[in-house]
């Protein structure tokens, strides 16, 4: 499996995230992240009837702009909030199209010709416990309203994308996305570029 290191490219990008959200929406985003933590036992029981999380897959891939920033936020910041939650996390590429070119080079991905997205492939130790908090956190550390762009990074490889591994993951990801959209419509969160969440959610394909 190809490692997603920057190869044969003259301009090396910084590993520092470029799209950190401003402090003006920190409170609402913090509340959004903590939503699952504050669920009552009754709500959790009700949720489990809709989605049996005990059989949830442990892997997923997240696209949120430059994969170095995604890696930093999840491996460092998310694990600080949820110690021991991440079993492994690796940067690489994934395409929404299962027929996309195999084993693409970094240069080819950057050209936009392959359709691949820069992602962090994550394996959770306890997906039934940490998948939803991770999705909430994902929506908080980047701008999910800018189509194929994060900060100055623009192109299809920088798409906001959640690649799920089973139906249970997809149900939860869509639920959280819908909740954020409702907050934007109600103007309770105003720190993003627009009022429409453009994040795409789809099944995982080959990871490179």
Image (cartoon, grey):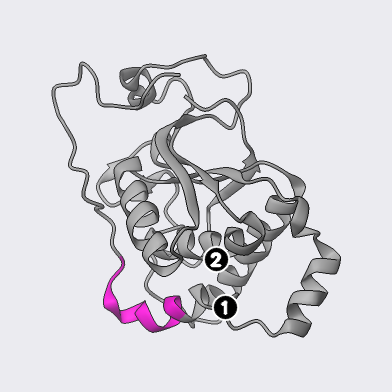
What is the residue that sits farthest to the front in this orientation? 84
The percent position of residue 15, horizontal first and vertical second, equals: 22, 44
Mark 1 residue element: loop
Identify the image quadrant of the N terminus: top left
Q: Which of the pair 86/120 is nearer the observer?
A: 86
- Mark 2 and mark 1 in contact? Answer it, CB < 8 Å: yes
Is 46 on the left or on the right of 184, as rendered?
right
Q: Is residue 181 above or below residue 109?
A: below
Residue at position x 62%, y 65% from top?
A: 176
The percent position of residue 49, horizontal first and vertical second, equals: 86, 68
Which mark identifies residue 4? none
Residue at position x 55%, y 82% from top?
A: 186
Which mark identifies residue 133? 2
The percent position of residue 92, horizontal first and vertical second, equals: 41, 31
**Span highlighted in magenta in the image:** 21-30
Q: Which of the pair 40/102 is nearer the observer?
A: 40
Q: Residues within 10 Å of mark 2 (few under 14, many from 20)?
A: many
What is the residue that sits farthest to the right in this orientation? 49
- For the stretch drawn in magenta, what is the main secondary structure? helix
Q: Which of the pair 11/36 is nearer the observer?
A: 36
Please name the residue that numbered disc 1 is placed on: 37
Is 170 on the left or on the right of 185, as rendered?
right
């Amino acid at each position: 499996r190809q490692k997603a290191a920057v190869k044969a490219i003259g301009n090396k990008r910084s590993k520092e995230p470029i799209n950190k959200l401003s402090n003006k929406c920190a409170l609402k985003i913090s509340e959004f992240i903590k939503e699952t933590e504050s669920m009552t036992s009754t709500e959790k029981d009700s949720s489990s009837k809709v989605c049996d999380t005990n059989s949830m897959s442990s892997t997923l891939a997240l696209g949120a702009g430059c994969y170095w920033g995604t890696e930093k936020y999840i491996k460092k910041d998310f694990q600080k909030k949820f110690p021991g939650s991440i079993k492994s996390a690796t940067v690489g590429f994934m395409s929404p199209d299962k027929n996309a070119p195999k084993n693409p080079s970094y240069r080819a991905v950057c050209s936009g010709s392959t359709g691949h997205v820069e992602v962090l492939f994550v394996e959770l130790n306890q997906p039934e416990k940490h998948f939803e908090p991770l999705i909430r956190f994902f929506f908080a550390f980047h701008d999910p309203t800018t189509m194929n762009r994060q900060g100055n990074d623009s192109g299809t490889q920088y798409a906001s994308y959640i690649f799920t591994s089973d139906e249970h993951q997809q149900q939860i990801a869509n639920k959280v996305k819908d909740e954020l959209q409702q907050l934007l419509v109600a103007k309770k969160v105003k720190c993003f570029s627009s009022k429409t969440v453009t994040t795409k959610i789809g099944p995982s394909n080959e990871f490179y």
